Image (spheres, rainbow, N blue to C red):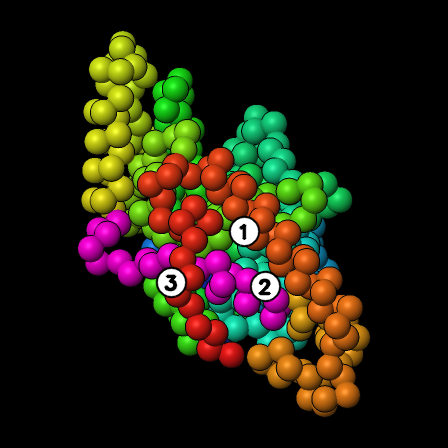
Amino acid sequence: MKFISLDNQNRIMVVEKDEFFANYDNFRHMIESDMQSYGMTTRLLLTRSPMDKSSNYVYSSVQMELLHDLDEYYKNEARVDDGIKFSEIFDIERKEDYDVAWNLDTVLLANHKVDVIAREMKKLKLSPFEAVLYAHMKVSEFRYHSTSESTYREQELSRVILGLIGDDPFIVCSGYSSFMMAIFEKFNNKNIRSEFIGLSLINKDTFAQSDHSILSIQLRDAQYGVEGKYFNDATANSAFSIGYLISTCLYPIHDQMYLKDQYAHVLNTNKNNIRNTIISHDLHNLSADDIVDKNKYRHQIEYVCRAYFENNIPMNKVKSDPISIEQYEDALYNIFVKEYYLTHSIPFDATGRPKSEKDEISEAELEKINQLVHDIIDHSTTHARAYFSSFASNSFIRPAHNYTSGV
């Protein structure tokens, strides 16, 4: 906690959100006591711990109720028109930083968008594997849309869940990762654990460099026999014009080294502050000025990228076996069957079976679902072959038929 003094009667209190909610009554008493006893207006700005690896700007329904109540106090009694402010990516050092920070309405609207998907996932009784597939498809429905990025706040908007609000949401790679991670936190299944992974990508032909963000997902699902850590890139599958793509949903971690057109290295994921994996500033770049002859330096670049990758994610300590096409097919099929039953108000169990035999889905509807699954797998295979090199091990590149459904 720290204070920024504005004048003799106004100050800004900057508090990490975990500390704030752990001591909510004490903070509330202090804010009201400052006003009643000293005529001092203590404004509140919530931030996050540098060690906090949770999704940004995500709050539970209980926390939202407390925030809403305090926000009303600020606006109606303390005469602070902005109410509570939020800044979970950038530090607050002066009043100008506070002025451009986000208000509660913005945070509330963004959380509502996440809540809608998480609640639907719970209604569908999705298993962990199904949940990741479902979230991947829902998040990738959004069209990649960057802001002008003329200010830090505009740059942040498309990279956190706050960019989801409005009719034309702003979302780039960090935004897709933030969105998925927020969904998993709201879904709250102990068998799904995710974290940000920062990447540096280097074009194999031009050597142009770009920064990228994906998720690492630790997953366990006994129903499908899926267990291990995988990478997930919703950005690469986003806004497909004729349906869904899942070619970059839960691919083996080492496949990141086998992209078709780019070299990739993983930035240090053990940094004290997660903001550097969301909005990149000083990265471990390879200088383009040092590259005179492409062929001469190509192997050096590949070696350095691989070294960065293996240093940050030791492959001998990670289980990341390819998920078979049959596992994807079964999970997609069950998701769409459950959606059908939920839409038609037909009770069903967690495996996707109706409670009553008379409510069995018709052959015609099953055929539609089977065709939908076939199309997703077919398009995803085509995309994977354009995205990964032939050395990748995911099943869209190297189909493996060794799966027996646990259903």
Amino acid type, residue under disc 2 in the picture: Leu
Q: Where does the image place residue 234, in percent across and percent down from the top left?
A: 53, 47
| Label 3 Cα crowd, 10 Å radius (few <14 / some 14-19 / many 20+) | some
Q: Is residue 21 left or right of residue 206?
A: right
Q: Which residue is mark 2?
A: 332
* Mark in the foreground, 3 or 2: 2
Q: Residue at x 55, y 62 (%)?
A: 329
Q: Is residue 84 left or right of residue 251?
A: right
Q: Residue at x 23, y 52 (%)?
A: 315
Q: Where does the image place residue 57, in percent across and percent down from the top left?
A: 54, 55
The image's mark for residue 180 is: none
Specify the quadrant of the image occupied by residue 279: top left
Q: Where does the image place residue 90, in percent across and percent down from the top left?
A: 46, 42
Cα distance in 3D space between marks 3 and 2: 20 Å
Cα distance in 3D space between marks 3 and 1: 17 Å
Question: Is residue 112 covered in magenta?
Answer: no
Q: Secondary structure at mark 3?
A: strand
Amino acid type, residue under disc 3 in the picture: Gln
Q: Which residue is mark 1?
A: 246
Cα distance in 3D space between marks 1 and 2: 10 Å
- Mark 1 or mark 2, which has the lower sequence index? 1
